[in-house]
Image (spheres, rainbow, N blue to C red):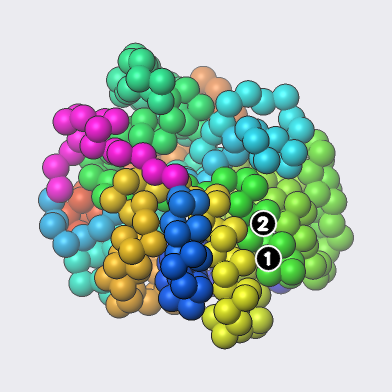
Amino acid sequence: MTDKHARPRRRRRILRITLLLVAVLILGAAGAGWWAYSHLNGNIDSVDLDRAIGDNRPPKVVANAQNILVLGSDSRAGANGDLDHGDVSGARSDTAMLVHIPEGRAKATAVSIPRDTLVTRPECRGEDGKTVPPAKRVMFNSVYSLAGPACVVNTVEQLSGVRVDHFVEVDFAGFKDLVDALGGVTVTLDKPMSGAKGGLKLDAGTHRLNGTDSLKFVRTRYGYGDGSDLGRIGLQQQFMMAMLSEIKKQDAFGNPARLYKLADSATRSLTTDSDLASLTALSDFARSMQGVDPDTMETIMLPVAYDKVDPNRVVVAEPQAGQLWEALRNDRKIPASAKDSPAKG
């Protein structure tokens, strides 16, 4: 696949996956009866954001706009530990994007936050109930491991001034199970993936990946492109589009058994805020999003620049980031100048 053809595909990202999984839950629950509903409903974990964060949150500016923080967790706990044997404790937010749904529900915007971004972490309450003090120049993906998802939400809110209405998190094991439930996903590379530092090794061309290899694919960093976290974001976007194509090709919505298998995999890997933590709530939310056309979704990376002290890290680029956040807060069109990231990967 050439860069020319890859770019349009990379524009349609994880919101489609999120909404698609929600739709799977709806259809699966509708056809499987009370036992299935109870089983799937019981799979979902949740976090009460208001209780965890308290009053230290930005105000809601546009009442009917929605902002959803989507996290991919790289926890090594439980089943996830079998999927990554690196000597890494705790968990990190391996993927993070803030998805903005405008008031008219017509066009969505997804802002990826590079995990190597140095940020200011606010004072948080950890998952053990203890206070975590504020700190400057910490890596964004370390916030999750230290204080959990509510602190990630609060960090994003303090960074952007945007009120986060909901958050959705999917873990390693759930991602693998979703791919395996589909029987694999096909991807095409325009250049080889070297397998550096224990990553996946693939020749240029088309490959059918199972769940374990798909996980390696989306986590590949050093073996493809410029080896940066910014470059990996493009691989993740490409894979999500390939997964959507696979679901469409298999007509998964027309196969109740496969729908249930997908829904079971999705809910077992899903953590949401408490307001979304049921099939009923997810269904209602999905129905409210029906006007969103994923094909018109805009994808933006948070504008960042290479850090002058540590070139392996990036910092938020101004004034671009400030313009971006102001547009999202006020539900306005994002100016072109706000999309120009000095560090591009």
In this rendering, the answer to whether 343 lies above or below 148 is below
Q: Quadrant of the N terminus?
A: bottom right
Location of residue 119 in the rendering, given as x and y in whole percent from the top left corner: 40, 28
Residue reaching furthest to the front? 35
Q: Which secondary structure lies at badge 2?
A: helix
Residue that carries the numbered disc 1 in the rendered image: 181
**Where is residue 52, by image quadrant?**
top left
Specify the amino acid type for callout 2: Asp
Q: Which residue is drawn at 75% across and 39% down?
A: 82
- Amino acid tagged 1: Ala
Secondary structure at badge 1 equals helix
Q: Can you tell which mark lies on residue 236?
A: none
Give the image location of residue 103, x and y in percent. Answer: 19, 66
Mark 2 to mark 1 CA distance (whole Å): 6 Å
Q: Residues within 10 Å of mark 2 (few under 14, many from 20)?
A: many
Q: Is residue 302 magenta?
A: no
- For residue 172, side relative to residue 93 (left or right): right
Q: In this view, does 219 lie to the left or right of 157?
A: right
Quadrant position of residue 120: top left
| On screen, residue 22 above or below 316 | below
- Tell me where residue 283 appears, x and y as whole percent: 35, 67
> Which residue corresponds to mark 2?
177
Residues drawn in magenta: 45-60
Look at 28% across and 50% down and name the residue there: 275
